[in-house]
């Protein structure tokens, strides 16, 4: 790979005279570790004439998939206007651009504004999903976020008061009233407010929390604490960015057995075992 003008082979106008359409692939790079990319994401990076990535959010290991002659652009210092000229070049030169996003591009990736501009420009586009940081953190601590009869929903949100205003009704305090599992992105810099809103919403102070910094990066730090200790924990480790907080009773609960995998449950691919089916029915009747 090289930093400089693209030397990719795609061009406007081929030997047969038909124009090659430029395309932009929005690639979910996962939480950091290069082996948490999907095969499709790695292939998209390998296909690209230009790879645009944010050094502040994406681990450089993901660039190992880029071609030696690909042009690598760090967008960390660029506003959207700084990225648009690359999309315009993709139109003019029929280039393939891989635009790398951390985690899954559908979450806080400024995806839509870019996608809409690319479509307006007549570019072919594709979104390649990635492993979101909340999934990576759950895996790192070996926890299911949806424990039967304890928590069956996961709220993905962020604290208000940051750079982007929150729509009304989406305050952490309001979501906390559900008492289910929450994943808090982009919120570590205001950990005092985070803790207060979670408690005001109704979580008991002993609700388990996981604080994860740079999950799957070489300097990953993952700490478990109770909600009452959340702000002190975040501050003690001086965490303010690249940090995700999980909170909710599912982080410590065993719960009841999932009906889906019970031998008494049947579906299109599996028969129920009759005596297990009877006991499952009785358990449902008495609940
Ligand atoms: C701009 S958002 C992007 C989220 C991303 N699209 C995703 O699906 O994870 C950045 C926030 O995601 C969380 N985050 C992303 N990668 C992380 C990681 N490796 N470890 C912990 N938190 C991470 C942090 O809350 C960070 O402030």
Image: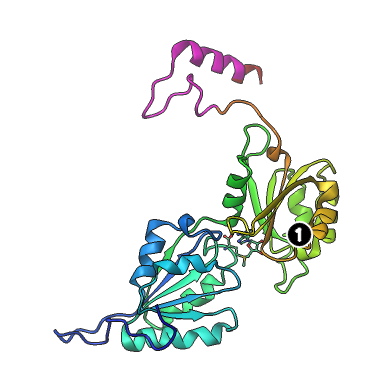
Q: In which quarter of the image is the N terminus?
A: bottom left
Question: Residue at the location (73% across, 39% down)?
Answer: 249
In the rendered image, residue 268 lying in the magenta stretch gets the answer: yes
Query: How many numbered discs, if any?
Result: 1
Mark 1 residue CB less than 8 A from any atom of ligand 1: no
Task: From the viewer's perspective, tell me whether residue 167 is left or right of residue 266.
Answer: right
- Callout 1 environment at 10 Å: few (<14), some (14 to 19), or many (20+)? some
Work out whether 208 lies above or below 15. above
Where in the image, quadrant-wise, is ligand 1 located?
Answer: bottom right
Residue 119 quadrant: bottom left
What percent of the width, then of the height, locates residue 228? 85, 47
What percent of the width, then of the height, locates residue 275? 48, 10
Task: From the viewer's perspective, tell me whether residue 238 is left or right of residue 23.
Answer: right
Q: Residue 120 versus residue 132: which sits nearer the camera?
A: 132
Work out whether 10 lies above or below 29. below
Work out whether 238 lies above or below 228. below
What percent of the width, then of the height, locates residue 50? 40, 79
Question: Residue at the location (48% across, 55% down)?
Answer: 36
Q: Residue 95 versus residue 76: which sits nearer the camera?
A: 76
Quick one: which residue is furthest to the left in this view?
16
The residue where tag 1 is placed is 171
Residues rendered magenta in the picture: 259-283
Residue 59 quadrant: bottom right
């Amino acid at each position: 790979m090289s930093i400089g003008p693209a030397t990719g082979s795609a061009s406007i106008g081929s030997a047969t005279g038909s124009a090659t359409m430029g395309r932009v692939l929005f690639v979910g790079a996962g939480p950091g570790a290069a082996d948490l990319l999907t095969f499709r994401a790695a292939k998209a990076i390998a296909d690209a004439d230009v790879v645009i990535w944010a050094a502040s959010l994406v681990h450089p290991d993901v660039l190992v998939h880029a071609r030696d002659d690909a042009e690598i652009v760090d967008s960390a210092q660029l506003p959207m206007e700084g990225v648009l000229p690359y999309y315009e070049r993709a139109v003019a030169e029929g280039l393939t651009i891989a635009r790398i996003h951390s985690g899954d591009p559908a979450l806080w990736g400024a995806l839509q504004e870019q996608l809409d501009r690319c479509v307006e420009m007549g570019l072919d586009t594709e979104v390649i999903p990635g492993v979101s940081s909340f999934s990576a953190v759950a895996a790192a601590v070996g926890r299911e976020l949806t424990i039967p009869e304890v928590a069956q929903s996961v709220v993905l949100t962020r604290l208000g008061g940051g750079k982007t205003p929150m729509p009304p009704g989406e305050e952490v305090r309001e979501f906390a009233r559900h008492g289910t599992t929450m994943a808090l992105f982009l919120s570590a810099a205001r950990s005092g407010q985070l803790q207060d809103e979670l408690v005001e919403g109704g979580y008991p102070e002993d609700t388990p929390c996981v604080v994860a910094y740079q999950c799957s990066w070489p300097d990953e730090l993952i700490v478990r604490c109770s909600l009452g200790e959340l702000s002190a924990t975040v501050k003690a480790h001086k965490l303010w960015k690249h940090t995700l907080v999980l909170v909710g009773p599912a982080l410590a609960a065993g719960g009841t057995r999932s009906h889906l995998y019970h031998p008494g449950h049947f579906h299109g691919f599996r028969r129920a075992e009759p005596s297990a089916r009877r006991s499952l029915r009785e358990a449902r009747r008495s609940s």
